[in-house]
Image (cartoon, rainbow, N blue to C red):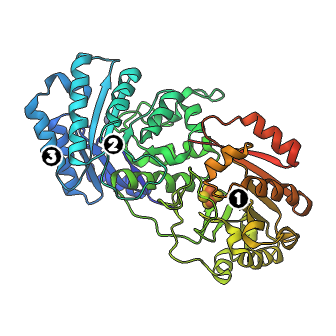
Amino acid sequence: MTYLVDTHCHLNHDEFNQVSETVGRAEGEGVSYVVVPGWDIRSSERAVELSEMFERLYAAVGIHPHEASKADSVSLQRVESLSKHKKVVAIGEIGLDYHYNFSPPEIQRNIFEAQIEIAKTVGLPVSIHNRESDADLMAILERQATGSWSLPRRFSYQINPQPRGVLHSFNSNYDIARRAIALGFYLGISGMITFGKKDTETELQKVVRAIQPEHLLAETDAPYLAPVPHRGKTNEPAYVPIIVRKIAELQGLNEEDIRRTTSYNAYKLFGVGEAPPPKIAYQIKDSLYLNLTLRCDSDCIFCDRKGEAMVKGHNLHIEREPSAQELIAEIDDPTRYKEVVFCGYGEPTTRLEVVKEVARFVKGRSGRTRLDTDGHGNVINHRDILPELRGIIDAVSVSLNSIDPVEYKRLMGDQNGNGWHAMVDFAKEATKYIPEVYMSVVGVPGLDVDAAKEFVENEIGAKFRYRPEF
Ligand code: SF4
Ligand SMILES: [Zn+2]
């Protein structure tokens, strides 16, 4: 199982007087890394001190909105000097809290923005506290993000916005979630996700169900907000798996999928943890995906194959395309999986012979096969390839993306403009040879989902699949 990261845990709180025991229990549960944020100067210094004592503890330094009225230029300078310590990975926790209003809102906003400026100067992400202050918070973030707010480029980001920080212990609505993600913020999911009644979903649970795990981080916010069944008691980093399991349940994914994805997110944002090695075969839920190639005849505006090429915490950035024998060795026994999927962060029909050879192996061992394609296989191979797939491919999933050829051309970066017709003909033809044909769309702005569904079902005779943008 993949290690976990507690991305927000106050081990610098007086509640934790036996930090090594708490850290030991966390490690026993697979929580290998912890980010410890400060809330004032003293607690920030303590966070740095702890990070020096424990190899896998990291610190965030900053002044919480509750403490804003006590802050002055000297304390802000101290935040900046502490932030240069090598184990400091964020400025936090900073933000706004209009619930308690322990500091006047105007002072909170000033201190918050002053610390965003520090984060920009030193090139660190921010860890943000937000309580009943959605409107002002988003106004500040949206204004700040239009300027030159970028972090050092640890990775190349083709499509996803540069990460800038996390809205820790997220508890706002879907609209705020979407806007924050668009600005490059992650949502920190705490034990609050486990609160609520058994049969009615809370607003937060609905949000987490609707957001792709690529935008989520796991955190405890210990010693506060202990998850059920420890609610009301002292929280600790050993409880991160409870939160991760709840996220997995809401997302309909395996616990391991959420472990891998959230831990990678923590690595991407804070540089905490380990870089995942490239894979030629990878599991998501119960299916095994084969990473055949990074080559593609399309150049979709939402595709990240030339960027990070990460999918749910799996690194698809292969240096060399795998052979059929290497893929067969990875599959071993195909009946262990619901299906073996030919994909890649590229177009698998560019490697048609390998697809056929491996598919024959899977079918020979009573497995099930699926081909995920942009539907340009006939153009790429200069012939009708569908008869060759008959009997060895059980399902084909074609990226429809748009029912409008002009919009398709724009989305797919389709140079000659024939891609849409080639794709539609391929899907229609596929229904004659392949038992199950799906067509999928990604929920980009302006997409008419109902019209796409009607087109797929009535014009093509295929099944419709929808994937949200975020
Ligand atoms: S078809 Fe798929 S692999 Fe090719 S550019 Fe589009 S999203 Fe990327
Ligand atoms: Zn906190």
Q: Amino acid at mark 1?
A: Asp
Nearest-to-viewer mark from 2 and 1: 1
In which quarter of the view is residue 413 placed? bottom right
Label 3 crowd bin: few (<14), some (14–19), many (20+), radius 10 Å: many
Q: Position of residue 218 (x, y in %)?
A: 44, 45
Q: In the displayed structure, would residue 363 be above or below residue 68?
A: below
SS under mark 1: loop
Q: Amino acid at mark 3?
A: Leu
Nearest-to-viewer mark from 2 and 3: 3
Q: Could you tell me if residue 328 is visible in this image?
A: yes
Which residue is at 83% across, 64% downward?
A: 394
Dot label at residue 374:
1
Compute the Cα span from label 2 to label 3. 18 Å
Residue contact between numbered discs 1 and 3, judged by CB atoms under 8 Å: no
Dot label at residue 82:
3
Q: Nearer the viewer, residue 418 or 170?
A: 418
Task: Say whether disc 2 or disc 1 marks the residue closer to the N-terminus.
Answer: 2
